Image (cartoon, rainbow, N blue to C red):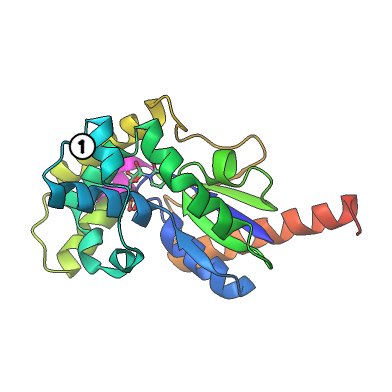
Amino acid sequence: MIIAVDGPTASGKGTISRQLAQHYRLPFLDTGLLYRAVGWTLRAQGGNADDASDALAACRFHSDLLADPGLRSEEVGGLASRVSVHPAVRNALDKRQKDFANQPGGAVLDGRDIGTVIAPDADAKLFVIAKPEARALRRFSEMKSRGEPAVYEDILADILRRDERDQNRAAAPLKPAEDADLLDTSDLTIRIAVQQAIALVDARISRRVDIDPT
Ligand code: CDP
C-alpha cells in the first residue's frame, strides 16, 4: 500500500505521515529532506540557489547526509524551497522517490508532489492544510523549544513566501491531486489529526477493496 501525504510547510504533514507509517507498519520517506540535502550541499559548494546548474550540481550528495540534524534548520529549509523550483533538480531526485514508493509492501511518503507526480497511483492520498497563522505559531513554538531565536511575524512572512513559491512554480507545483482527501489541521490537536488521517486512509482502502477485490 502506498500512502501519499502532501501539503504546505508546517501543516502537520510530517508528524501525520510518521504516525501513519507506524500505524500501517510501512517504511517512511520525508522527501523534503532530499531537497534540504541539495540546499545544504549547494551552500557548502558556495553555489547560487536560483541558478539551475549550481542547484543540479548539488544533487550529488551522500545518503549519510540525510541523517544530519543540520538539514532541519530554517536556513536550509529556505534554500531547499529555492532549489526545488528547478525542473532539473526535481528530475534528479525523482527516481529515488519513485523507487522508495514502489518497494514491495508499499510505503508512506510526504512532500509536495507525491500524489500528483511521484506516486499518482497511490492507494490513499492526503492533502494536509492549515491556516498560515496556525502554521506560523507551530513553527514559532518548535523553534522556541529548540532554543532558537524566533520572531512570529518573520516566520509568518517566510511561510507565505514559501507557499507562494511552492504553489506557483511551473514544475510540480503544490496542489492537491484530484483524488486526494483534504485534512485541515488548523483547529486539531495532533492526536485528533492523526486519528482523522487514519480514518481517511482506511476509508480509501476499503473503497478500493470494494472496487477491486483481487
Ligand atoms: O518542513 P517544511 O515543510 O518547511 O519543508 P520540507 O518538507 O522539509 O521541504 C523543504 C522544501 O523542499 C519545501 O519548501 C519545498 O519547496 C521543497 N519540496 C518540494 O518541492 N517537493 C517535495 N516533494 C518536498 C519538498
Image position of 55 (left or right of 123): left
Residue drawn at x 20%, y 57% is 73
Residue 20 on image: x %, y %: 56, 66
Q: Main secondary structure of the magenta part?
A: helix
Q: Quadrant of residue 90?
A: top left
Nearest to the observer: residue 135 or residue 120 = 120
Q: From where the camera sits, is residue 87 visible? A: yes
> Quick one: quadrant of the C terminus?
bottom right
| Magenta region, residue range | 131-136
The residue furthest left is 149
- Residue type at numbered disc 1: Ala
Q: Counting other residues with Cα less than 10 Å from the Cα at mark 1, is it few (<14), some (14-19), or many (20 or more)?
A: many
Image position of 144 (left or right of 108): left
Residue drawn at x 75%, y 58% is 205
Q: From where the camera sits, is residue 192 visible? A: no
Residue pointed to by mark 1: 49
Q: Secondary structure at mark 1?
A: loop
Residue 138 on image: x %, y %: 29, 56
Work out whether 107 lies above or below 115: below
Q: Is residue 170 magenta?
A: no
Q: Is residue 132 magenta?
A: yes
Residue 66 on image: x %, y %: 33, 64
Nearest to the observer: residue 53 or residue 165 = 53
Image position of 128 (left or right of 83): right
